[in-house]
Amino acid sequence: MLSVSLSVDIKDWLRKKGEQTGKSMEDIAAEILEQLYKSEQGQSDSVDHIHAFN
């Protein structure tokens, strides 16, 4: 489990993305962090490849 403080704007954005995809805001945040981690590990060319969240 991970607990983080986020701005109201980011929480609202995560909530909206969750509503659009039928996922929880926690699941959306976890997917974003995993994509960023993989990008940092060289498994993706750049962060721009996070298509699901653009």
Image (spheres, rainbow, N blue to C red):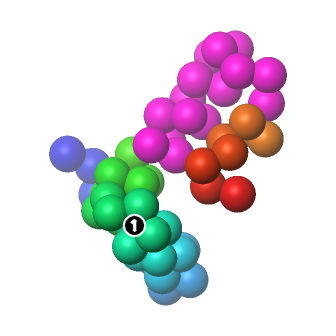
Q: Quadrant of the C terminus?
A: bottom right
Amino acid on which the number 1 mark rests in the picture: Gly
Q: Quadrant of the N terminus?
A: top left
Residue that label 1 marks: 18
Q: Is residue 40 visible?
A: no
Name which residue lies at 65% across and 14% down: 43
Name which residue lies at 66% across and 42% down: 50
Toward which corner of the image does residue 36 lie, by quadrant?
Answer: top right
Q: Is residue 10 magenta?
A: no
Tally the numbered discs.
Answer: 1
Residue 11 position, x and y percent, is: 45, 76
Q: Is residue 43 magenta?
A: yes
Toward which corner of the image does residue 4 lie, by quadrant?
Answer: bottom left
Task: Name the residue furthest left.
Answer: 1
Residue 13 position, x and y percent, is: 53, 75
Chief secondary structure of the magenta portion: helix
Residue 23 position, x and y percent, is: 32, 59
Q: Is residue 29 visible?
A: yes
Camera-nearest residue between 40 and 21: 21
Question: What residue range appears in magenta?
Answer: 31-46
Residue 17, placed above or below residue 26: below
